[in-house]
Amino acid sequence: MGYMQVYRVGNSSGESPLGKISRLLTGEGIDCDDLGDDRPDNGCVLIDFTQGEDLVNETVATVPQLPQILAASTMTLGLRQLAIADDFVSPDMPDAEIIRRVTTITNAAIRIVEDVPDPDKKRVLVDGGTGEEDPLYGFAKVLEELGVEWEPLEDENDMQGTGIIYSHYRRLSYARLLQSDFPGYYHIQMAPNPELREEALSVGDFSYVTPKVESAEVGERHTRFMEMLDRMRDPDAVRDDPMDDQSLDALFIGDRNIGNNLQNEFGDDIELATMATTAGAMAEAKKHDLVLIYLGGKEDAKQRLAFLQMLLKEKDKPDLALLFLKQAPDQLRAFCQKNNVAVIESNRPSEIADSLLALSA
């Protein structure tokens, strides 16, 4: 197993389900970090199911490109969890099962998207005989009852297609070959017993034990796989990330007419509040993402520079910038460089806005 990254959403402390599973994965060399403001392209996300379905829905909308796995307190919820997420794990599962579920779904998603970024078709294929005497006869009937359109696997390979391939048990060498010949597909083996299911999982295929699988579970999992494909291929179609709607919340300390002019010229990307004096500015500054200070005339400059020096001493402070409508004096430029204060030299609102957005990026 190569490097793998798992992201967490929810309560991962102490003996919480997410905490236990996170520690298990970390012990196996799988990095687990809080999702936070990250928007990764690869990996998977573990969601704390104890915090309710709203958190699940919010996470899917935020990072639809990642497989979504519920971390639940018990595995007995089963199909209910599959109805709202791509898979589920819980501390009462065997450790090996948890690790396999996480690694299999993550590796498959990476392979499908990276190897076939722009598929030319999406199909459901069945690899194996489906006649009355064949092992997949009953399973094919289940697909038909569920209204799933499928076709027999007849091509030698398909390097540009995507979808799902259902098959009877495969030898390890054949399973690996089929993955390389059909890289854009989820590969699901219908194993006749638990031992052969373990073998299927060892090569990165998904697998059900055919005599035990119920049509309801097949239907739920089939729906999830197809939805995963759609999300990964076109995440923007379902993305509703609150961070996309966030504008930069900035405070301007300087001449009010300059602040008002900037506010009128800035677009929706920047919300600018203006304070002409430094009275009460310390408390106000901590409410904003960034503070932009214009020194102005001699007396104002003394007060505003003193305020900047006070703000620099604060442990939790916003991003800071000094605005110069002309070239900044060398002494002030050196001061800003030493104290990690940005210098913006422009009298054009569009250029000032671009500089502020670059600072907050």
Image (cartoon, rainbow, N blue to C red):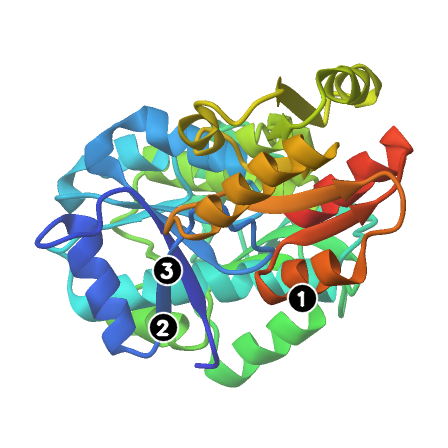
Q: Judge the density around disc 2: few (<14), some (14-19), many (≥20) Cα neighbours within 10 Å.
A: many
Left or right of 36: which side holds 333? right
* Amino acid carrying mark 1 in the image: Pro
Q: Quadrant of the N terminus?
A: bottom left
Residue 30 is labelled as: 2
**What is the spatial separation of the Cα atoms under label 1 and label 3, in whole angstroms?**
28 Å
Q: Nearer the viewer, residue 212 or 254?
A: 254
Q: Which residue is mark 1?
A: 183
Which residue is pictured at 57% across the width and 33% down the height?
243
Where disc 1 sits, the SS reads loop
How many discs mark residues in the rendered view? 3
Eye-nearest disc, 2 or 1: 2
Q: Position of residue 77 (x, y in %)?
A: 19, 36
Which residue is pictured at 79% across the width and 35% down the height?
353
Q: Residue furthest bottom?
A: 173
Q: Earlier in the sequence, mark 2 or mark 1?
A: 2
Q: Earlier in the sequence, mark 1 or mark 3?
A: 3
Where disc 2 sits, the SS reads loop
Above or below for 56 versus 93: above
Residue 33 is labelled as: 3
